[in-house]
Image: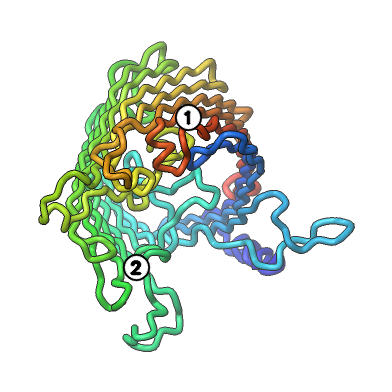
């Protein structure tokens, strides 16, 4: 989309605004400078740190009436200096289009309900399985049809969502012989559907989530393998409206069906967090435990080895969990399929209305036995990590975030990543990020 086309779209939205409708234009400029030395995986000693600045730019057009609402969100994500069209006097840009549609949906309104059609953000509970993945510069949205029913008086909520993805618009009939419509190891899932049921009480809520995700068979795309995930989420006093005192969050999920290779799945996830809030919500202290199942290399039972036991996080959030902000454990392969078990501590303190400090400690180990390739097994200990975060709310439109993380991998985890004990390095990550969210126009304000 070029500047002229964008201007026409904005003009049409503005002309369409009337007395019974509301039109808004807002944006997000997010810039994050990073110093990376061991981010995503441990590094060897004497390796120079990487430094770069990433930028996300979004322009949002919002239109709202009594019967429906819409959002069109355009996004550009880039790293400073990545332009490949340059001359001696400056940067001319990129040779390819870097702008994309982040969200594009219409939500039809009914009594206590809505039907949202199109590309949309999704966030459910603590985002363990369905998330907007906001730490990632591009974020994450879903092409789907989602029906939501909410009743504030009874506290019930019910969501059902469905999608079916194709890679091309010019498919002819049901001819899959060329494989061009394949959704597999590289492309995202071909279909995802879920049912979500939530019941809210005074200081807590309970929700049930059942997801089915479809992957095409690589040798026969007409065959769809379905991965099923279902479980319960408990939340006591742990929302933004939570009060001083005890709070807690827990998840218990099972995973079954078939994986992308058609192999039977038998996996599970269990998380628990309990804490205490005090000083008029200024101080929060919490301990937590997490376990993602993995495949036990010591188990020689034939039936066991015919199944997949490593838990798949699907589209869930990774950076806030798993396990520390160095992001060493965000995919199942990071522990060679051995799962994860973590105990940790979080401490958050609000200095005032604008400033907040956060501290997190994670002790990470394998959930099961993993073969080391030398006839033995890796030790269970993987790493300890610490994260320090400072957040400053400069004003209603500007937030400044800073973080420093340090990781101490075990010798076995270094070996798992191909690093000899004598070559192990120092692993750390620093970032500073500014988020500016200006509101350009609101037709409701005269």
Does residue 199 appear anywhere in the picture?
no
Observer-nearest residue: 334 or 117?
A: 334
Q: Position of residue 314 (x, y in %)?
A: 33, 52
Secondary element at tag 1: strand
Disc marking residue 190: 2
Of the two numbered discs 1 and 2 on the same chain, state the one appearing first in sequence: 2
Q: Position of residue 445 (x, y in %)?
A: 60, 44
Observer-nearest residue: 338 or 325?
A: 338
Disc marking residue 407: 1
Q: Position of residue 318 (x, y in %)?
A: 40, 42
Q: Position of residue 416 (x, y in %)?
A: 39, 42
Q: CA distance from mark 1 to mark 2?
A: 37 Å
Observer-nearest residue: 43 or 358?
A: 43
Q: Kindly check if marks 1 and 2 are in contact, taking CB atoms under 8 A apart as contact.
A: no
What residue is rendered at 48% in x and 59% in y?
70
167 w.r.t. 273: above or below: below
172 w.r.t. 117: above or below: below
408 w.r.t. 121: above or below: above
Does residue 97 appear anywhere in the picture?
yes
Local crowd size for mark 1, using a 10 Å CA cut-off: few (<14), some (14–19), many (≥20): many
Scheme of colours in the image: rainbow
Q: Quadrant of the C terminus?
A: top right
Q: Quadrant of the N terminus?
A: bottom right
Observer-nearest residue: 346 or 40?
A: 40
Question: In this view, which residue lies farthest toward the top?
Answer: 279
Q: Which quadrant of the structure image shows residue 352?
A: top right
What residue is rendered at 48% in x and 41% in y?
41
- From the image, state whether disc 1 or disc 2 is nearer to you: 1
What residue is rendered at 65% in x and 47% in y?
440
Local crowd size for mark 2, using a 10 Å CA cut-off: few (<14), some (14–19), many (≥20): many
Secondary element at tag 2: loop
């Amino acid at each position: 989309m070029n500047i002229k086309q964008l201007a026409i779209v904005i003009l049409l939205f503005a002309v369409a605004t009337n007395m019974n409708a509301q039109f808004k234009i807002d944006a997000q400029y997010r810039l994050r400078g990073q110093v990376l030395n061991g981010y995503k995986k441990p590094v060897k000693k004497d390796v120079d740190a990487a430094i770069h600045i990433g930028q996300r730019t979004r322009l949002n057009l919002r239109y709202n009436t009594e019967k429906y609402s819409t959002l069109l969100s355009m996004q550009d994500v880039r790293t400073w200096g990545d332009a490949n069209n340059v001359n001696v006097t400056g940067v001319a840009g990129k040779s390819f289009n870097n702008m994309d549609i982040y969200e594009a949906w219409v939500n039809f309104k009914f009594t206590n309900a809505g039907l949202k059609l199109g590309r949309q953000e999704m966030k459910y509970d603590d985002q363990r399985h369905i998330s907007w993945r906001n730490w990632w510069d591009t974020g994450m949205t879903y092409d789907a049809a989602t029906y939501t029913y909410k009743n504030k008086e009874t506290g019930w909520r019910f969501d059902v969502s469905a999608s079916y993805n194709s890679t091309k618009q010019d498919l002819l009939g049901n001819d899959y012989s060329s494989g061009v419509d394949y959704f597999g190891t590289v492309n995202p899932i071909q279909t995802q559907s879920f049912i979500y049921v939530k019941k809210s009480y005074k200081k807590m809520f309970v929700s049930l989530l059942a997801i089915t995700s479809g992957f095409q068979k690589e040798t026969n795309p007409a065959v769809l393998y379905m991965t099923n995930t279902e479980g319960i989420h408990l939340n006591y006093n742990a929302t933004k409206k939570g009060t001083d005192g005890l709070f807690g969050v827990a998840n218990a999920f099972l995973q079954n069906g078939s994986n992308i290779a058609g192999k039977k799945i038998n996996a599970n996830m269990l998380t628990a967090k309990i804490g205490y809030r005090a000083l008029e919500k200024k101080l929060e202290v919490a301990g937590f435990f997490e376990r993602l199942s993995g495949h036990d290399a010591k188990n020689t039972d034939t039936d066991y080895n015919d199944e997949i036991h490593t838990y798949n996080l699907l589209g869930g959030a990774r950076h806030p969990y798993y396990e520390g902000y160095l992001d060493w454990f965000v995919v199942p392969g990071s522990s060679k399929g051995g799962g994860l078990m973590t105990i940790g501590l979080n401490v958050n303190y609000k200095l005032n209305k604008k400033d907040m400090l956060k501290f997190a400690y994670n002790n990470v180990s394998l959930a099961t036995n993993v073969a080391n390739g030398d006839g033995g097994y890796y030790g269970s200990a993987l790493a300890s990590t610490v994260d320090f975060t400072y957040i400053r709310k400069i004003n209603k439109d500007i937030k400044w975030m800073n973080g420093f993380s340090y990781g101490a991998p075990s010798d076995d985890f270094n070996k798992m990543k191909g690093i000899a004990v004598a070559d192990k390095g120092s692993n750390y990550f620093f970032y500073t990020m500014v988020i500016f969210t200006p509101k350009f126009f609101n037709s409701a304000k005269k």
